[in-house]
């Protein structure tokens, strides 16, 4: 059995059966620039603690799976360039080589499940990319949601993805997409989108209950919770869409492929919006951390 190394706080929470919220680390290494990445990671942990749960940021450090990261480790990850981005396919190879790597949504779910953590907060998940019919770029996050029983709170599929295709794949895989408190699907920076959410619930307790019913039904896989960004922090869909399309075009012109696509687009969109997309990104993650904690409190 591969060993998980828990931080003292997470260890204590597990012993006391206290609510825990998992957090990914790719958002730190690949999703945001320094120093916003470090500041945000700290603020997100604070939101979770203040809501009454224990944060467990997950990463692989020198070949050891860590559940709960000390501030110094988060700070190092925030500053280090070229940290490995670990999805399901990369985990074993990273451990074998005693490498350091940041976990994506998929890898974080796998480790959260091993640690017995049922709720996970992030910003955005990977999905079906625009022009996937040409590139075949579909994130392993979607498959993971169909396999691993963790409820993942995100802010809805990012406009860098093909949203209808992402919803179709999730439906095929049997993943419930549950929007919190509204019928329209939020789209990351935008609290609204032209698309309806397949499902919706308006109470964190019901989201926890739905997770439990799925367990009782022996259904594999998790739930995807789409939590709308607060209106005052959003960039409306019609405003962000042309910017995203411009960034996507540049990615193709620059022959950006595979793991590089999402980080490239995020950085480009931040540049094109003069930092406004990053500000929204930070607020939506904190908002998701709060909802995830409320859900975790209901288990
Ligand atoms: N979306 C964001 N920020 C991120 C990511 C997605 O807004 O940091 C990261 C997450 O870790 C997600 C991963 O799991 O990108 C998906 O990458 P890919 O599309 O290469 O599977
Ligand atoms: Mn991809």
Image (spheres, grey):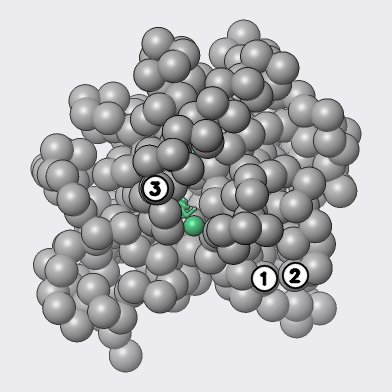
Q: CA distance from mark 1 to mark 2?
A: 6 Å
User: Whole-percent x and y of residue 5?
Assistant: 23, 69
Mark seen at residue 256:
3
Quarter of the figure that contains the N terminus: bottom left
**Which of the two residues, 117 or 88, is positioned nearer the viewer here?**
88
Q: Is residue 203 left or right of residue 96?
A: right
Residue corresponding to mark 1 = 146
- Label 2 CB less than 8 angstroms from ligand 1: no
Q: Callout 2: few (<14), some (14-19), or many (20+) C-alpha neighbours within 10 Å?
A: some
Of labels 2 and 3, the one closer to you: 3
User: Whole-percent x and y of residue 29?
Assistant: 27, 44
Mark seen at residue 173:
2
Q: Secondary structure at mark 2?
A: helix
**For residue 245, what is the image quadrant?**
top right
The reply to whether the C-beta atoms of the residues labelled 1 and 2 are less than 8 Å apart is yes
Vertical position of residue 12 compared to residue 237: above or below: below
Q: CA distance from mark 2 to mark 3?
A: 28 Å
The image shows a total of numbered marks equal to 3
Quarter of the figure that contains the C terminus: bottom right
Residue visible at 44% across and 39% down? 253
Vertical position of residue 173 compared to residue 208: above or below: below
**Which of the two residues, 94 or 52, is positioned nearer the viewer here?**
94
Q: Callout 1: few (<14), some (14-19), or many (20+) C-alpha neighbours within 10 Å?
A: many
- Label 1 CB less than 8 angstroms from ligand 1: no
Mark seen at residue 266:
none
Residue visible at 75% across and 70% down? 173
**Which of the two residues, 63 or 53, is positioned nearer the viewer here?**
63
The reply to whether the C-beta atoms of the residues labelled 1 and 3 are less than 8 Å apart is no
């Amino acid at each position: 059995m591969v060993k998980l190394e828990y931080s003292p706080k997470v260890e204590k929470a597990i012993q006391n059966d206290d609510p825990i919220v998992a957090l990914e680390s790719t958002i730190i290494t690949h999703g945001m620039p320094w120093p916003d990445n470090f500041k945000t990671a700290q603020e997100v942990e604070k939101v979770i603690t203040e809501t009454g749960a224990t944060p467990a940021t997950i990463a692989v450090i020198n070949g050891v799976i860590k559940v709960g990261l000390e501030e110094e480790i988060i700070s190092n990850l925030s500053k280090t360039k070229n940290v490995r981005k670990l999805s399901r396919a990369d985990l074993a190879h990273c451990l074998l080589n005693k490498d350091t790597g940041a976990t994506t949504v998929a890898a974080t779910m796998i480790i959260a499940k091993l640690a017995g953590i049922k709720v996970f907060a992030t910003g955005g998940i990977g999905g079906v990319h625009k022009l996937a019919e040409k590139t075949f770029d579909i994130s392993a996050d979607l498959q993971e949601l169909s396999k691993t029983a963790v409820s993942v709170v995100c802010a809805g599929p990012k406009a860098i993805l093909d949203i209808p295709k992402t919803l179709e794949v999730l439906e095929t895989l049997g993943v419930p997409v549950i929007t919190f408190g509204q019928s329209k699907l939020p789209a990351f920076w935008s609290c609204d989108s032209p698309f309806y959410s397949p499902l919706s619930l308006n109470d964190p307790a019901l989201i926890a209950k739905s997770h439990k019913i799925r367990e009782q039904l022996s259904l594999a896989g998790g739930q995807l919770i789409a939590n709308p960004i607060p209106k005052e922090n959003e960039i409306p869909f019609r405003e962000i869409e042309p910017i995203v399309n411009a960034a996507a075009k540049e990615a193709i012109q620059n022959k950006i492929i595979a793991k590089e696509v999402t980080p490239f687009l995020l950085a480009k969109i931040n540049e094109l919006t003069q930092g406004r997309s990053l500000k929204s990104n930070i607020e939506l993650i904190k908002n998701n951390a709060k909802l995830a904690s409320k859900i975790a409190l209901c288990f």
